[in-house]
Image (tube, rainbow, N blue to C red):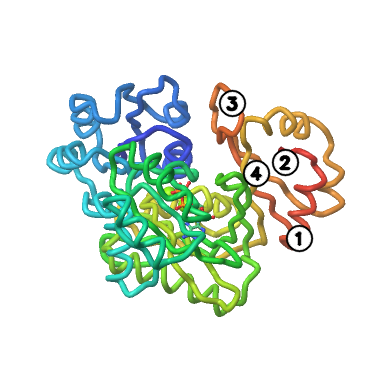
Amino acid sequence: GSTIGILGGGQLGRMMANAGSAMGYRFIALDPTPDAPCGQVSEQIIAAYDDREAARELAKRSDVITYEFENVDAEVAAMLMAESYVPQGSDLLYTTQHRLREKQAIEAAGVRVAPYSEIRSVDELREAVGRFGTPCVLKTAMGGYDGKGQWVIRSEGEIVEAYETLSRAGVQLVLEQFIRFDKELSVIAARSPQGEIKAFPPAENIHVDNILHLSIVPARIGEDVQREAERLAMRIAEGLGVVGLIAVELFVTADGELFVNELAPRPHNSGHYTMEACRTSQFEQHVRAVCNLPLGDTALMSPVVMVNVLGQHVEPLLALMARQDESAERLNVAPKVHLYGKKEAVFKRKMGHVNVLAPTTDAALEWIQETNIWKV
Ligand code: ATP
Ligand code: MG
Ligand code: MG
């Protein structure tokens, strides 16, 4: 029985611990929030992520260390590597913490990203906007999520305000050409320390207010594009020497061209569908990879739509769960509810998700419509 230490104790850690506990591993999470989602199903050290003493204790009590978010402090990562076994290493974190480094690594692996330019001054921004045309997207190089830390520049008149607003954070900026995508996809690939690589089927992702709303699998794109997306994700896993999971977000244009948007070196919200719909879940796969076990079969067993449960959806979802769901019966769908044990159902906060297993993704989408839960 080995113990796996997780830096971070949110829902990703919780689902990782649930999957790994079934395989006989013990878990200990480091997270500042008492009774964090992961702490409810594992042991927890309550301390800040960059608390050296707490990190040293985590290292002492763990045989293997992983993380559930990418903004791990570089010094903490180095310390953990010295005191314990961190199969994912720190290079992958260093690369994916910064959009410019990440894009360069993706290109070095032979995969396309949206044309981009490093921005160090308002003059450079003006010049780059001239080159890319409007709209284009200005992003902070570090720390952004859920669309925070970016600005879609729709006209030259916005250049100064966009620059001043985003550069206030003191971090580097990147300008990207706006990709008029037809669909957004993500592919999660896993790589073991021995170099075995497997990809999960691509998810078609739909965002609302920059927060993931739906992941539809199989994605409604041609099989050739699906295979190509998987191939690109595996090439990135290989090129970056990934260990564990790498989530690859992609844009697909109307003529089937693929551009990588960004990466996440961890389980991803758009991979939650794998929990019931694939022969191996992303969480089991991650545990397998970091524990140097052979990777599991990623085959899809059923069409599925994952729908996120935000704070405002919790109450109506609980009410639905408490009654006979005639819509589910009629449509022959099986909605699998996952709630993360978070106390306060704050508006827009991720509280859980539902994996709607169905004969077709259309049937799953129809059930989501009919519940009337996801109207806001
Ligand atoms: P996440 O929560 O996924 O980490 P994030 O804040 O890191 O989000 P991105 O994924 O870079 O942000 O962008 C958020 C969304 O904005 C994308 O999913 C996409 O819909 C849109 N977007 C970002 N960059 C571009 C682009 N270059 N062209 C067109 N749309 C874009
Ligand atoms: Mg991101
Ligand atoms: Mg993103």
Whether residue 75 can be seen here: yes
Q: Amino acid at mark 4?
A: Val
Q: Amino acid at mark 2?
A: Trp
Label 3 belongs to which residue? 346
| Viewer-side label of 2, 4 | 2
What residue appears at the point 31 percent right and 54 percent down from the top-left corner? 123
Residue 374 has which mark?
2
Check contact, mark 1 vs mark 3: CB within 8 A.
Answer: no
- State which quarter of the image contains the C terminus: top right
**Horizontal side, residue 84 vs residue 349: left or right:** left
Residues packed near mark 1 inside 10 Å, few (<14), some (14 to 19) or many (20 plus): some
Residue at mark 2 to residue at mark 4: CA–CA distance: 11 Å
Q: Tag on residue 376?
A: none
Q: Residues within 10 Å of mark 3 (few under 14, many from 20)?
A: some
Of mark 2 and mark 4, the one earlier in the sequence is 4
Which amino acid, mark 3?
Val
Query: What residue is drawn where x is 43% and y is 43%?
Result: 161
Q: Is residue 38 above or below residue 207?
A: above
Mark 2 or mark 1, earlier in chain: 1
| CA neighbours of label 4 inside 10 A, class few (<14), some (14 to 19), many (20+) | many
Which of pointers 1 and 3 lies earlier in the amino acid sequence?
3
Disc 2 crowd rating (10 Å Cα; few below 14, some 14-19, many 20+) is some
Label placed on residue 354: 4
